């Protein structure tokens, strides 16, 4: 089949992975397999290896099974605050010495808080792998929890909230705002960035309790990707992590979301915005179901790329906006979350275009999509775009994209090998499944509309 694979950056990927959209019965039928070795330490730490000697670099990633979705109810923003605390010193590394250690050895590092995990990672020359493992184990074993460190990071996080949300036009729109309007369960609907009063209220006891509860080896996964020797690395991991004590984990929170039965429409004023905006969100099917994978392909057809239907209608035909943005899980991708999720889109539009006109075009496009028959050509196009995005993600940032998926599947499914099943799951989706999913989920009863209006008044 003569189709061209699109991939950001490297055209060679289409030669490596091919573009054949024919179905396969097992992951072995595909040309590329991510190497996966998976085991657990006696203390419960999950360990994933993915060896790749293409370049003399390694990625070390530690993911903790705690995100802002299940942070304490009177401590909004606490999961994010704690991410900052993890750089404030440990038993053998003083304040910010972890950062210096990585950077002085030619590496880069970062951390982030997402819906269902908090992660930390380093990318280093391969011969510095042992250093990274030792350092991650050092801070997993204990933090420098002091009043000065807490007060300092409370100020840093509050300033981040002010800069990125409160004092920013369209700050938090729609990634932070929409879950608060579309969801009902507090765990899914609270302000993840944190209310300033809650951030101020955090105490040393809160920090210590949070660390002892969630930052334990039996609530974490360690991923190593890149140029390393497995036996040697296994020995280092056992030496540095093997004696860390496990913790008694609390009962799993009920993060289920009740089924939405009527459309919701909200208006939010923004005193810093110069033009109005509109966001729409539909509740996603349950993760790992056929409908879930079908929604991934629907996202490709409706929202991703210049050829997507909503971009065609809003940008090319109506000229209401320069782009329609969005997708599944705006704080990551459709694979690295574990709970209720939204498929979301948004656009900033001209002031003379009323929001009713935006909604009317959205309705027309969705009705057109759900009423017509899905052709095999449509499905093939979605599969090629999805495959391109998937492999772009796997190769992203020197192997971190691969580490991210491996860690997520280990945390959520106890099965990092799922990384090699994704393409096959998408290929199982037929035109009939895709059409049925669109008819069930892309309905007004499952939708929330958020209208952002510029205003000169204080919020």
Image (cartoon, grey):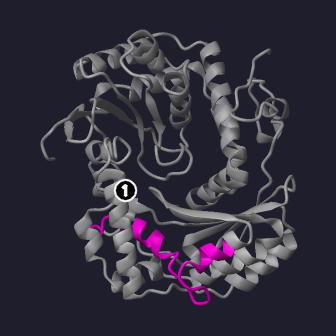
Residue 203 placement (x, y as % from top left)? 31, 82
Taking the spot 66% from the left edge, 79% from the top edge, the residue there is 135
Residue at 42 percent of width and 75 percent of height: 250
Q: Nearer the viewer, residue 100 or 1?
A: 100
Mark 1 — residue? 255
Q: Position of residue 151 (x, y in %)?
A: 35, 79
Where's residue 302, x and y in %? 49, 23
Residue found at x 47% / y 66%: 66
| Residue 182 sits above or below residue 84 on the image | above
Question: For the magenta stretch, what is the residue range?
Answer: 73-102
Asked if one can make out residue 74 in the rendered structure from this viewpoint, the answer is: no
How many numbered dots are placed on residues in this image?
A: 1
Instruction: Name the spot of residue 71 as percent of width and height, x first.
Output: 36, 66
Above/below status of 218 relative to 330: below
**Residue in front for this viewpoint, 64 or 445:** 64
Q: What residue lies at 67% left-to-right and 69% top-to-bottom?
A: 103
Return the residue nearer the eye: 314 or 377.
314
- Any magenta on residue 98? yes
Drawn side of residue 224 relative to residue 265, left or right: right
**272 falls in the magenta region:** no
Q: Quadrant of the N terminus?
A: top right
Secondary structure under badge 1? loop
Image side of residue 138 versus residue 38, left or right: left
- Taking the image as shown, residue 70 lies to the left or right of residue 434, namely left
| Residue 14 shows in this picture | yes
- Residue lying at the far left in this picture: please name it: 457
Local crowd size for mark 1, using a 10 Å CA cut-off: few (<14), some (14–19), many (≥20): some
């Amino acid at each position: 089949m003569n189709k061209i694979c699109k991939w950001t950056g490297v055209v060679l990927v289409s030669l490596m992975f091919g573009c054949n959209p024919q179905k396969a019965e097992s992951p072995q039928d595909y040309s590329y397999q991510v190497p996966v070795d998976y085991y657990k330490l006696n203390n419960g730490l999950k360990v994933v290896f993915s060896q790749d000697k293409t370049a003399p670099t390694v990625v070390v990633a530690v993911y903790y099974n705690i995100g802002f979705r299940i942070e304490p109810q009177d401590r909004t923003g606490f999961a994010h605050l704690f991410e900052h605390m993890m750089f404030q010193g440990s038993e053998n590394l003083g304040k910010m010495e972890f950062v210096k250690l990585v950077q002085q050895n030619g590496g880069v590092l970062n951390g982030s808080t997402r819906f269902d995990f908090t992660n930390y990672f380093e990318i280093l020359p391969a011969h510095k792998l042992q250093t990274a493992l030792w350092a991650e184990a050092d801070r997993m074993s204990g933090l420098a929890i002091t009043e000065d460190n807490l007060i300092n990071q409370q100020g840093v996080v509050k300033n981040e909230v002010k800069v990125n949300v409160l004092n920013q036009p369209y700050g938090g729109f729609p990634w932070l705002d929409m879950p608060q309007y579309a969801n009902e369960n507090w765990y899914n609907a609270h302000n993840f960035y944190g209310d300033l009063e809650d951030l101020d209220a955090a105490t040393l006891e809160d920090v210590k309790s949070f660390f002892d509860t969630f930052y334990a080896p039996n609530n974490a996964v360690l991923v190593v990707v890149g140029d390393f020797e497995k036996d040697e690395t296994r020995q280092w991991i056992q030496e540095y992590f093997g004696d860390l004590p496990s913790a008694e984990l609390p009962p799993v929170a009920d993060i289920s979301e009740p089924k939405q039965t009527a459309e919701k429409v909200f208006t939010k004023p923004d005193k810093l915005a110069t033009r109005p905006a509109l966001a729409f969100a539909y509740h996603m099917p349950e993760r790992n179901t056929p409908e879930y994978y079908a929604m991934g392909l629907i996202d490709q057809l409706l929202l991703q790329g210049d050829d997507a239907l909503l971009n065609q209608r809003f940008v090319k035909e109506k000229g209401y906006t320069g782009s329609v943005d969005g997708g599944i899980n705006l704080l990551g991708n459709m694979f690295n979350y574990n709970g209720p999720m939204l498929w979301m889109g948004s656009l900033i539009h001209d002031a003379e275009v009323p929001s009713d006109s935006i909604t009317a075009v959205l309705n027309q496009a969705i009705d057109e999509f759900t009423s017509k028959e899905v052709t095999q050509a449509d499905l093939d196009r979605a599969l090629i775009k999805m495959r391109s995005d998937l492999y772009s993600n796997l190769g992203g940032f020197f192997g971190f994209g691969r580490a991210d998926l491996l860690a997520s599947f280990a945390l959520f499914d106890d099965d990092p090998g799922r990384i090699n099943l994704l393409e096959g799951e998408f290929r199982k989706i037929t035109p009939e499944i895709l059409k049925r999913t669109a008819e069930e989920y892309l309905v007004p009863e499952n939708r929330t509309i958020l209208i952002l209006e510029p205003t000169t008044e204080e919020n």
